[in-house]
Amino acid sequence: MLAEKYDVFLIDLDGVMYIGDELLPGSKEAIAELRKMGKQIYFLTNDPRYLRQEFCEKLLRLGVSAHREEFITAGWATACYLSQHDIRQVQVIGTRSLQAEIAGKGIQVVKQGECQAVVVGYCEHTALGEIQQAVRQIENGAQFIATNSDISFPGNKGRCLATGSIVQVIQAASGQRPVIIGKPYSTMFQLALHKAGNHTRMVMIGDSPAIDIAGAHRNGLDAVLVEREPHSYPVPADYRIPNARLNNLVDLFQFHSEYREWRYPGFPWPDTIEPGVTAVIFNEHGKVLLVKRVDNGLWGLPSGHVEMAETVTQAIVREIHEETGLCAAVEKLVGVYSEPATQVFSYPSGKRTHFITLCFLCSISGGRLRADNSEVSRVAFFDIDALPTKLLPMHPQWLNDALGKADLAQIR
Ligand SMILES: [Mg+2]
């Protein structure tokens, strides 16, 4: 049975223990059984509206045994994050309980005036003026921190609006991406690992593939899905695929449960997939043109995104000109590269993009070599036997493909 496979159980509240004020079938009995077996239990919720004590009282009211220290909420995790990062003054969009959770860590919650960070949670009484003020604070340099990114959650009359909806309004108006504390990001899982003494036999049980399952896998943990409607993911490396599926928590004690291994596929789970272009350009001495990227400090072939309403050849000619000042002409397609192990890029903002990149052999038709200074700090031609050591790892392969005699493009 699945219950025997693990020592520590991280259990989601909304949609696993209860929906609204109604306990879900079997959840109370399952918690009692896990306790009888001596298992550690932590309740993880992205709901930032209440104190840990309030969630604890709710479970006790519903007849489930629980202790305050077993709750890892997005609100409490946010307060821990602020305190760890020495953030002393914040504007809070959220309930009195969220404000109290943050103030409980000795952090000053300000209504107006300067602050180091804006914390966005959820409160149904939030006024548009507070959202406007948050945007101004972020414009003036305050950090943008979201308790969680859930757009909505299940209620007994249907979906209820949640934090992510407010976060997206502020993100759209400020043009900034927030640091997100709740699942599927790592803060709450790291707090759980810390509390449980870095136990290896730990599992997350949740009802959201994108939040609970992907979150657990991102943090190297097994994940079990409480599934009310069937989900399927065609790609085996998908982080949203659970190790096992349950109808409800009592299925943990069934003798024949299906379990499948989920292994780290060698790349982080991307947020988006985008078309990209790259160029191999040789000068008259057979040296290759490389640029040094500002964002990661690495050398690489000139490259970039395909913009909307642009062909791939227009895109590479534009990118070469923007990055290096040179005018170029496309000679031939060298290869198409989509392997996620090398084509998923993480940016400092936290965004992760999976690129499908077309690499072209190009020739120089004019222009004057210079670095653009915003995306690239240096541009230079290199002997192919003396490439810089700090080079994007997949580019030597692409360069080899360009130097090869094959008539057809490589597909990798
Ligand atoms: Mg849930």
Image (cartoon, grey):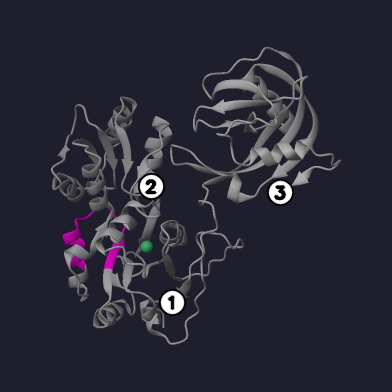
Front tag of 2 and 3: 3
**Residue 308 shows up from this direction:** yes
Q: Is residue 284 above or below residue 175?
A: above
Q: Mark 1 = which residue? A: 247
**Amino acid type for the residue under numbered disc 1:** Asn
Q: Amino acid at mark 3?
A: Arg
Query: Considering depth in this image, is 194 or 229 the residue closer to the camera?
Result: 194
Residue 57 in percent (x, y) is at 17, 66
Q: Earlier in the sequence, mark 1 or mark 2?
A: 2
Q: CA distance from mark 2 to mark 3?
A: 37 Å
Q: Which residues are magenta?
A: 42-58
User: Assess mark 1: CB under 8 A from ligand 1?
Assistant: no
Residue 341 part of the magenta-drawn span: no
Report the residue marked by disc 2: 164
Q: Earlier in the sequence, mark 1 or mark 3?
A: 1
Q: Amino acid at mark 2?
A: Gly
Image side of residue 222 versus residue 13, left or right: right
Label 3 sits on residue: 412
* Magenta run includes residue 45: yes
Foreground disc of the pair 1, 3: 3
129 left or right of 367? left
